[in-house]
Image (cartoon, coloured by chain):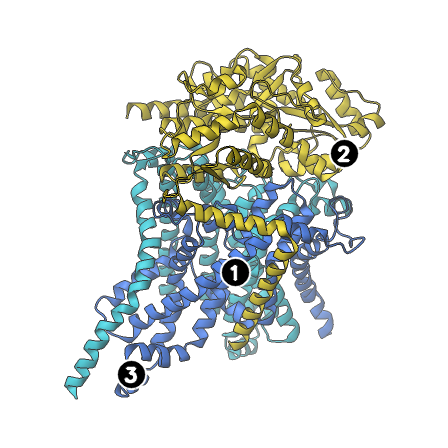
């Protein structure tokens, strides 16, 4: 009786599972087909396992170059964000600075403002500062735009750390910097993971900032590189599929290994307006 | 947490290895990366001119010509050892190209010589004072006069057209043979070819009208067919001298609707992306294709065995004329600090040797006087030009919005909207544009 | 002792400022300044290259109010947002109710539903752009294969469908996130509440309406607000798949402002559209805060 009851439930669940899996399945098998084969047979398995599309996407489409750019930008941005956001949150929570509430509010407003609002102005400003078309400019942008949410996470956590710990450390003669490095940060592993994963996904996948800030082909990041190499050669869907897989694999693998942290990081980040 | 960092690190290392291996596997890639490095360096080096060597920057979007341009630069540098030319190839996306070009011009670095399209883009740069007046430099004498006029604004010459394209219907020779079809010469022939193809299970003319600009290949052609002697046919709309709801606009736009009714294009043409239309033709699913002569090389690349012929699309009641669609023009930065070197380089690009080399290598049509190119790919293109030829009319338009309005009206009509209401809607937008531009002038 | 305390506090007071310098500087230069400039710029006219920027007062806003494309973009944005909100919330809730209890198989489904959130919008856009392709795409081919030829469409150019087709892609990506939020909400409902409802003779449906729904109120509100803001901000999927469409059939606010700046060099007008977008999103955020405060 119970089993029969569960049939509709699993039908619904499977239906949505298929909806998620099917496009992914199609891309994976499509990436091994020739263009003609894809046209004649979208759903079936490829006749042979040829890697030509991957070779063409990676070398011909320049994804190898874009890969390096993406790694550099994502890596450096995350390190800077972790450092600066935790420092700011530390200063705002652990000491009584005048106006710290106001400063916190200034940062937090940033969570609600969509990037589209200032994107054009940002691009113009970068040109004036000679930071357009440079990875450094892109990194600064990510740091500035991701700080509000990251500070929000660190602030929420550090506020909960009992003041007794701080006082004890002070009596031991701990300097401010030591307090940050030796006392508060080791306690903050949770928020560090959240901030790291959220930003990893956001920056690795972002398209809007490189779209307006980077026009030099050699400096593009993966998503924009993929978007543009579609227009550069006469496009082949199969090569595009191979490119899609190359871009997605790092994060998908990480996600499957660290599901809990990913789900926590991304869904907390969803609060970001 | 530790696990996360470990995995991240490992992935990074893996990626690095992958990239490192790939670089050594593929020497070409390595070279290009070095050059990009060079590009960055040279920008900073440019300022220190102690070496007595002048460095100039040449900026273009033409990635497909990269190798040819590099060779030409090498030849130029051999002749002029005191000048170094740095070639910068940006994105092949036009909005991106003009964004970067403008930023280089405004900050006055990195664009001594540059490529630009005749028409609204050139107009904007000239108005802002960034294009050098080339009228009395003697360069004009090196070009066939018919190609110069599109770069003339207020009687002054601001650019030198390096090459041009044409719009055409490509037809698959194999399929045409199989169906017993001949190269169409009249509208009735085209309708017949489309019908026979459709009956045999092929798509007729593959069209990718999902992107707005692609419709211009059709309406510009119709415009030229109907009024071959009036290149100002769009400019008149922009100035308010003519209205979209009058002749000849109504007739030629009605032609578009007739073509759709006659089933010339594949089903879903409005939802097909331009790239997809090329694929459909290259795969032999469609017997014909509407595109420009720039696609010749790319289609061959997709399938070497593909054989095709070209013809210009006739109007419903009039024969076809050949269209000259200007490609890139060479411009010199009016504010360049290295004017002398920039001019020398431009002169070199305008020489018969350079012109011949460029056109032979890139399979493009020549504009420099005395250049003749014999290549089988180009002969099909030149056949398009055998009768009357007309310069693309939107090159004379000054506001990019004007072109967009025409694109949009055509897209509406091709999508099955009523011709009259679409034209009225278009005229409303043009009126608003004229009013706004007048406002601006009085300000 | 008191004196020492003061000294420590004073030292701390000085050095903690140092901790704020770098974050504040970067934030101000690369976030605050462009946003403020956007506001200022919306009162100017500039083509991106002319030496002079002309002050035009509210002209850009007046032009916007008279621009049919702007209203089309607003309407499309609203349609997109409503579709997104309705489907992402309902489907998310349905799936969450089915899998909120912890078990291996439920975990598997949760992981799977969340997977698209890890993919880049560009890749999702490219994949779905192919699926929707009228000639080669999987969707039409699938419909043909199961004998529903008359349902095939030119999904991304048909004015009546395209915006919903695009919103559906967003739903495809976002459902996993609503599932996670609802699952968390459901797990927080004390079991006793259901028990006492059952004792009162409530069937499964009554339990759902009497216990689950009221207890999920704040979660639902959060999901609603998040999807609403997500809908108004939509750019990536639209940009990748249609770019707004040849006749603005899928133009939304973000693609519109991008085009005005980069295709037509109307930087001032583009700024005015950005400011409008900001105002809309701010209103939604404020309403959200009010509602949340009331309910909790």
Tag 1–tag 2 contact (CB < 8 Å): no
Disc 3 or 1, which lies upstream in sequence? 1
Tell me if B397 is positioned left or right of C90 in this view. left
- The quadrant of the rendering that contains the C terminus of chain A is bottom left
Residue underneath mark 1? A71
Rendered cyan, the chain in question is C
The local secondary structure at tag 2 comes to loop
Q: Which mark is residue A174?
A: 3
Mark 1: give few (<14), some (14-19) or many (20+) Cα within 10 Å. some
Q: Which mark is residue B306?
A: 2
* Closest to the observer, B27 or C185: B27
* Closest to the observer, B6 or A167: B6
Distance CA(mark 3)–CA(mark 1): 37 Å
Mark 2: give few (<14), some (14-19) or many (20+) Cα within 10 Å. some
Q: Are marks 1 and 2 on the same chain?
A: no
Rendered blue, the chain in question is A
Instruction: Identify the image quadrant of residue A9.
Output: bottom right
């Amino acid at each position: 009786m119970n089993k029969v009851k569960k049939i509709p439930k699993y039908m619904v669940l499977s239906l949505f599972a298929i909806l998620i899996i099917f496009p992914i399945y199609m891309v994976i098998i499509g990436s091994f087909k020739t263009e003609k084969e894809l046209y004649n047979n979208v759903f079936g398995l490829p006749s042979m396992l040829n890697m030509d599309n991957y070779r063409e996407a990676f070398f011909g489409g320049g994804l190898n170059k874009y890969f390096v750019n993406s790694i550099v930008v994502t890596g450096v941005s995350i390190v800077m964000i972790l450092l600066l956001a935790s420092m700011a949150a530390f200063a705002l929570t652990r000491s009584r600075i005048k106006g710290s509430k106001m400063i916190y509010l200034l940062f937090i407003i940033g969570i609600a403002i969509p990037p589209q609002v200032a994107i054009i102005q940002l691009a113009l400003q970068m040109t004036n500062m000679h930071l357009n078309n440079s990875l450094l400019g892109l990194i600064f942008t990510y740091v500035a735009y991701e700080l509000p949410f990251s500070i929000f996470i660190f602030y929420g956590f550090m506020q909960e750390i009992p003041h007794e710990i701080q006082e004890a450390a002070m009596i031991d003669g701990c300097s401010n910097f030591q307090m940050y490095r030796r006392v508060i940060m080791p306690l903050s592993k949770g928020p560090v993971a959240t901030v790291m994963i959220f930003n990893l996904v956001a920056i690795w996948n972002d398209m809007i900032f490189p779209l307006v800030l980077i026009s030099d082909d050699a400096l593009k990041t993966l998503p924009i590189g993929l978007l543009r190499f579609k227009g550069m050669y006469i496009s082949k869907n199969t090569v595009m599929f191979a490119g899609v897989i190359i871009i997605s694999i790092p994060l998908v693998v990480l996600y499957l290994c660290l599901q809990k942290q990913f789900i926590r990081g991304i869904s907390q980040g969803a609060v970001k307006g | 947490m530790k696990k996360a960092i470990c995995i991240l690190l490992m992935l990074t290392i893996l990626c690095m290895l992958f990239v490192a291996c790939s670089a050594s596997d593929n020497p070409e890639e390595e070279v290009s990366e070095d050059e990009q490095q060079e590009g960055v360096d040279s920008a900073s080096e440019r300022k220190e001119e102690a070496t007595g060597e002048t460095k100039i920057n040449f900026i273009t979007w033409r990635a497909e010509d990269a190798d040819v341009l590099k060779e030409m630069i090498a030849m130029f540098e051999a002749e002029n050892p005191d000048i170094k030319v740095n070639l910068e190839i940006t994105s092949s996306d036009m909005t991106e190209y003009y964004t970067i070009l403008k930023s280089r011009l405004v900050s006055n670095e990195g664009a001594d010589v540059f490529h630009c399209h005749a028409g609204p883009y050139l107009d904007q740069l000239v108005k802002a004072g960034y294009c050098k007046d080339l009228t009395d430099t003697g360069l004009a004498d090196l070009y066939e006069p018919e190609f110069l006029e599109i770069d003339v604004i207020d009687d002054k010459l601001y650019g030198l057209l390096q090459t041009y394209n044409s719009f055409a219907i490509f037809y698959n020779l194999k399929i045409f043979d199989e169906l017993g079809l001949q190269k169409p010469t009249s509208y009735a022939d085209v309708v017949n070819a489309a019908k026979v193809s459709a009956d045999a299970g092929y798509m007729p003319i593959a069209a990718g009208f999902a992107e707005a600009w692609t419709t211009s290949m059709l309406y510009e052609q119709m415009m030229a067919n109907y009024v071959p002697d009036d290149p100002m046919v769009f400019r008149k709309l922009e100035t308010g001298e003519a209205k979209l709801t009058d002749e000849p606009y109504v007739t030629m736009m009605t032609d578009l609707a007739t073509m759709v009714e006659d089933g010339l294009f594949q089903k879903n043409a409005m939802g097909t992306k331009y790239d997809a239309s090329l694929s459909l033709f290259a795969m032999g699913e469609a017997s014909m294709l509407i595109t420009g002569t720039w696609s010749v090389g790319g289609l061959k690349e997709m399938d070497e065995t593909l054989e095709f012929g070209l013809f210009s699309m006739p109007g419903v009641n009039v024969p076809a004329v050949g269209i000259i669609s200007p490609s890139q023009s060479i411009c010199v930065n009016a504010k360049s600090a290295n004017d002398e070197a920039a001019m020398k380089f431009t002169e070199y690009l305008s020489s018969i040797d350079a012109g011949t080399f460029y056109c032979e290598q890139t399979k493009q049509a020549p504009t420099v006087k005395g250049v003749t190119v014999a290549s089988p790919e180009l002969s099909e293109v030149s056949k398009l030009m055998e009768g009357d030829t007309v310069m693309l009319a939107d090159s004379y338009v000054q506001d990019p919005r004007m072109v967009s309005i025409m694109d949009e009206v055509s897209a509406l009509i091709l999508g099955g909207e009523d011709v009259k209401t679409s034209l009225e809607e278009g005229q409303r937008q043009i009126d608003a544009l004229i009013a706004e531009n007048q406002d601006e002038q009085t300000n | 002792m008191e004196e020492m305390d003061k000294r420590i506090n004073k030292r701390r007071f000085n050095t903690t400022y140092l901790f704020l310098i770098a974050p504040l500087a970067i934030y101000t230069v690369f976030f605050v300044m462009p946003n403020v400039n956007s506001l200022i710029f919306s009162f100017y006219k500039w083509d991106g290259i002319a030496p002079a920027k002309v002050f035009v007062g509210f002209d850009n806003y007046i032009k916007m109010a008279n621009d049919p494309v702007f209203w089309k973009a607003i309407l499309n944005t609203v349609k997109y947002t409503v579709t997104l909100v309705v489907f992402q919330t309902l489907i998310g809730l349905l799936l969450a109710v089915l899998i909120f209890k912890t078990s291996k198989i439920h975990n598997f489904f949760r992981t799977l539903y969340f997977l698209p959130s890890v993919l880049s919008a560009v890749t999702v856009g490219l994949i779905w752009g192919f699926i929707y392709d009228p000639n080669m795409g999987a969707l039409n081919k699938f419909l043909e294969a199961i004998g529903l030829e008359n349902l095939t469409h030119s999904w991304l150019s048909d004015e009546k469908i395209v915006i919903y087709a695009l919103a559906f892609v967003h739903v495809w990506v976002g459902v996993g996130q609503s599932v996670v939020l609802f699952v968390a909400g459901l797990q927080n409902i004390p079991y006793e509440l259901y028990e006492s409802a059952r004792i009162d003779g409530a069937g499964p449906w009554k339990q759902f309406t009497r216990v689950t729904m009221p207890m999920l109120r704040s979660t639902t509100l959060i999901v609603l607000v998040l999807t609403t803001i997500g809908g108004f901000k939509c750019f990536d999927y639209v940009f990748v798949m249609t770019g707004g469409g040849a006749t603005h059939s899928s133009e939304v606010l973000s693609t519109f402002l991008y085009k005005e700046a980069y295709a037509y060099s109307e930087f001032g007008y583009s700024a005015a559209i950005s400011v409008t977008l900001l105002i809309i999103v701010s209103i939604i955020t404020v309403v959200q805060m009010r509602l949340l405060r009331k309910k909790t």
